[in-house]
Image (cartoon, grey):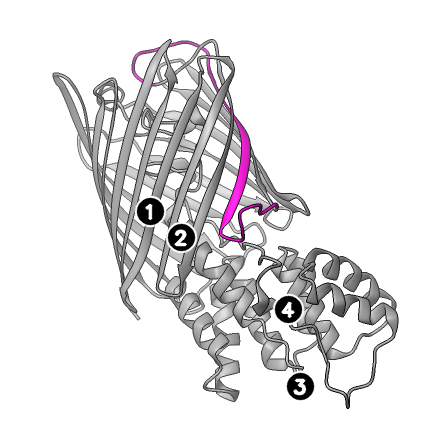
Amino acid sequence: MKQSVCLPTLRSILAPVLLLQTLPLTTLAQTTDFSPSAAGGRQGISTPATESLILAPFKYIAPSSADTTTKSAGPTEPDKPRRKASLQRIVDLHAAGDYQAVGTEGLALMAREKPDDELQLIVANSLAWTGRLKEAIPAYQGLRAGKYADQAAVGLASIYHWRGRDDQAVPLYRAVLANDPGNSSALEGLDLATRETSPRTLLSFGRGADSSENERRSATLNHRWRDSSGAHVMEVETSLVVDSLPGVETSQQDLTVRYQNLNLALKPSLELSMPTKDDNSLYASVRVKLFDEKVTLSAGRVNWGRMATNPNALALHLSAIHAGINAAKDYSFGNLSARFSFYDVSDNNSVWTGNLHLTSSWRPLGSHFRPFVGLETRGAAAQTANYWSPSQGSGTLYAGLIGEWGASNWNLYGSGQAGVRMYGDAGTSWSLSAGGKYWITSNLALSVSLWSLDSWRDNASYKAQAATVNLEKLWR
């Protein structure tokens, strides 16, 4: 029986994951006043400069065991020989949708003996679907010749796609299409991968406001492209922000360039940014990845005045020396991530932020909904009115649910969460977010994100709302 990587990996995994590109990489509350941080949220109105060097790789969403498209159990034709019990058990686990067990027992089996190609494809697919991408790669590579070569190539290309190496995925998809021009898996995969490797121009408009009458309006024009190898990623961006409080308004326009070399072991990223008037400061940040990209280190001099989302901070041209670490790992119970950042601000203050976040593998409401829990913290050496700086600290424990739906040309998400005070300048909170992206044509997309928060800050009730609209044009 033919095993295909197409349906579970491209439709039930990649389509909902595409929407994650429209979400910021980190929690905005750590650096701004319009942020979900007080509620431990994961979406915001923009991405701080220190956390936006290069978009994160795609994250998989494991297929639901109720998804019948993933349950091809292996050979059932009467003319095929029966497998011995140890091998048949893996086929049965696959049919039952227990992909974690298939991957674990399949790896143990492959260490002892060489399974038949069909069984090896079952194991490789199950490893990929459950996030064990590094282990799935050699399983697929062992099938690059023979009856299942095209399916293995599509599976391997999908892994490169999820890991942000679309430059490696594109040649594999094209090789499959050279053999089989109508292969739907390769056609869909190639379309998704070339969305990442093609030159892209992005126009973005945003607005946020909070209960202190602090408001930000922003506009950004970004262009991203790659060299002919696809491994060198470049971006140039200009953005304008206007921050205001009653009787106070400050604006700033900047020019930013970014570069990443995907071929180097540490996948280094560099960002340089400079305001275009009234401030001759140069801001620079670097990011590297360690331990098979599970840990990211970042450091640099950042534009704290802009990150603070406050007209007074922007007018003072505040900067900060930043150092941070992010780590994430997949477990059988879910994806666990942690982040810590320290900012030495130019006004002689210090701010530090942290987050511990677990997205559960448990799907009590079906494959479209993912529960999550986490702990968000923030602290400061001294309190100032120019940005959120809780000298007594702030700690919030939060829990919520995110729902995602999508196909190859659209996606939607919605999330809600509630938080409770752990210590310091925190209180009971909630936040809601929603958004989506629609490809009007194969090269033109429109996306929208909305967010609202009700929380506690500076010993008072705090509310904030934000909205962003993006228009994205591919040049392919």
Q: Please name the residue shown 38% across and 27% down the image.
A: 31
Task: Determine the CA span between mark 1 and mark 3.
Answer: 42 Å
The residue identified by callout 4 is: 71
Look at the picture and state if 392 lies above or below 122: above
Q: Amino acid at mark 1?
A: Gly
Residue 244 lies, in percent from the top left, at 18, 24
Please say whether residue 385 is one of the residues in the magenta stretch.
Answer: yes
Mark earlier in primary sequence (2, 4): 2
Q: Please name the residue shown 82% across and 61% down the image.
A: 108
Q: Amino acid at mark 2?
A: Leu
Inspect this view and state whether residue 474 appears.
no
The residue identified by callout 1 is: 435
Mark earlier in primary sequence (1, 2): 2
Q: Which mark is residue 147?
A: 3
Is there a contact, CB below 8 Å, between mark 1 and mark 2?
yes
Label 4: how many residues lie within 10 Å, few (<14), some (14-19) or many (20+)? Answer: some
Q: Which mark is residue 237?
A: none
Mark earlier in primary sequence (1, 4): 4
Task: Determine the CA span between mark 3 and mark 4.
Answer: 20 Å
The residue identified by callout 2 is: 19
Closer to the camera in the image, 432 or 18: 432
Look at the picture and state if 445 lies above or below 469: below
* Dot in front, 2 or 4: 4
Inspect this view and state whether residue 384 appears.
yes
Task: Determine the CA span between mark 1 and mark 4.
Answer: 31 Å
SS for tag 1? strand
* Dot in front, 1 or 3: 1
Residues drawn in magenta: 362-387
Task: Describe residue 290's horizontal placement relative to residue 135 as left or right.
Answer: left
